[in-house]
Amino acid sequence: MISGPIIVMTGTPGTGKTSTAQLLAASSASLDPPFSLRHINVGDLIKDKSLHDGWDEEWQSWNVNEDKLERIIEERPAGEGLILDWHTCDAYPERWADLVVVLRCDHTTLWERLEKRNYPLNKIQENNESEIMQVVLDEALLSYPAEIVVELKSDTPEDMENNVDRILQWAKVWREERAQEEER
Ligand SMILES: Nc1ncnc2c1ncn2[C@@H]1O[C@H](COP(=O)(O)OP(=O)(O)OP(=O)(O)O)[C@@H](O)[C@H]1O
């Protein structure tokens, strides 16, 4: 059985990674034939399964144990594709990703989204600046070949639906190409 693709879904906090990944996973199941794409919130997974070597105070994030994370990802059921949802992609080896989606958002919209989530002002400013300076996009372009990195605007619900449709189209072609390779 062809193993499913790994889609890295990244972007500044609040750009819509989780909402998009959830819609994508749900929509993939309704394709004909269905396509299994499982959404993984990598931050939660690292915390829940202790895939880390402690908390980094300076960076306010977990020191990810990449070997442990890798084991979990590589032991997924045959045929299953994954959507890895996290605000950074620096803990993933390059060979993992078949597609890297970087969600982008207008900075005023992002500010309002983070305010609604009751983020402290310094965190809102930090994330807003990071979005303006396209820090996550640059990080993705440094970590992966440019041809697998796609930057998608995620300002409105319509953008989200269009983005999901585009990724599903990509997944269908990806699957067809893999099936042809297997036949050869
Ligand atoms: N394209 C969009 N149009 C309208 N609202 C959106 C869009 N994307 C996300 N939102 C809203 O923005 C908020 C943040 O979305 P979400 O939690 O998916 O972002 P995130 O990037 O996963 O954030 P975090 O990194 O903090 O987990 C949610 O209230 C969500 O409904």
Image (cartoon, rainbow, N blue to C red):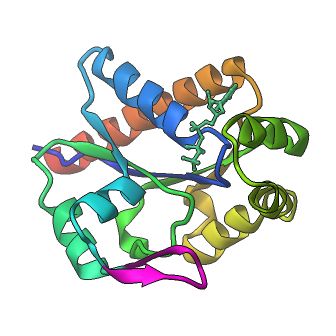
- Give the number of marks: 0
Q: Determine if the magenta segment contains residue 56.
A: yes
Residue at 43 percent of width and 30 percent of height: 22
Residue at 53 percent of width and 31 percent of height: 19
Q: Quadrant of residue 111?
A: top right
Q: Determine if the magenta segment contains residue 19.
A: no
Is residue 184 among what the camera can see?
no
Magenta segment boundaries in residue numbering? 53-63
* 96 or 173, nearer to the observer: 96
Is 58 displayed left or right of 130 in the figure?
left
Return the x and y of residue 104 as percentages of the image width and height. Answer: 74, 46
Return the x and y of residue 57 as percentages of the image width and height. Answer: 54, 83
* 61 or 159, nearer to the observer: 61
Return the x and y of residue 121 as percentages of the image width and height. Answer: 82, 55
The correct choice, above or below, for 99 with respect to 169 in the image is below
Image quadrant of ligand 1?
top right
The N terminus lies in which quarter of the figure? Answer: top left
Residue at 70 percent of width and 49 percent of height: 119
Residue at 72 percent of width and 70 percent of height: 138
Is 65 displayed left or right of 90 in the figure?
left
Q: Quadrant of residue 47?
A: bottom left
Decide whether the magenta segment is chiefly helix, strand or loop.
Answer: strand
Return the x and y of residue 91 as percentages of the image width and height. Answer: 43, 75
Q: Quadrant of residue 113?
A: top right
Is residue 86 among what the camera can see?
yes
